[in-house]
């Protein structure tokens, strides 16, 4: 497993409906993984402010909890 700078693991148990809601939210925002979506939702909740949408092909490592997602290039978001 590559070193992502995230040595802690957190297990979260979800109902089928919660998982479906997470996946729906993730797919509409083109998030690269469930983990990235959960980190973005956690960051949004902690910061209580909106965040830019993920760009197509953006790696999961760009989504941290305590900082804005890293953005490269001049790609426009799909708002």
Image: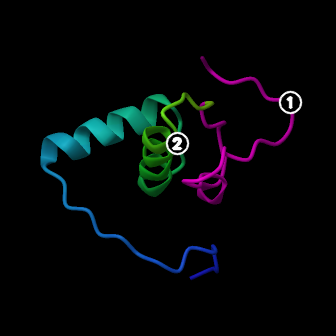
Residue 51 lies left or right of residue 10; in this view the side is right
Q: Secondary structure at mark 2?
A: loop
Name the residue: 66% across, 53% down: 62
Quick one: SS at disc 1? loop
53 and 67: which is toward the camera? 67
The x and y percentages for residue 61 are 63, 60
* In the depicted structure, whether residue 46 falls above or below residue 66: above
Q: Main secondary structure of the magenta part?
A: loop
The 10 Å Cα crowd at callout 1, few under 14, some 14 to 19, many 20 or more, is few
Query: Sequence-wise, which precedes: disc 2 or disc 1?
Result: 2
* Residue visible at 19% across and 61% down in the picture: 13
Q: Residue furthest front?
A: 47
On whether residue 70 falls in the magenta region, the answer is yes
Residue 22: image x %, image y %?
32, 41
Dot 2 surroundings within 10 Å: few (below 14), some, or many (20 or more)? many
Q: Which image quarter is the C terminus in?
A: top right
Region rendered in magenta: 53-79
Residue occupying image coordinates x 34% and y 41%: 23
Total tally of numbered discs in the picture: 2
Residue at the disc numbered 1 = 74
């Amino acid at each position: 497993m590559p070193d992502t700078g995230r040595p802690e693991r957190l297990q979260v148990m979800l109902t089928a409906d919660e998982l479906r809601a997470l996946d729906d939210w993730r797919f509409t925002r083109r998030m690269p993984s469930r983990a990235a979506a959960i980190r973005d939702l956690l960051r949004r909740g902690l910061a209580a402010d909106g965040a830019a949408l993920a760009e197509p092909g953006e790696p999961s490592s760009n989504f941290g909890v305590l900082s804005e997602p890293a953005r490269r290039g001049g790609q426009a978001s799909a708002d």
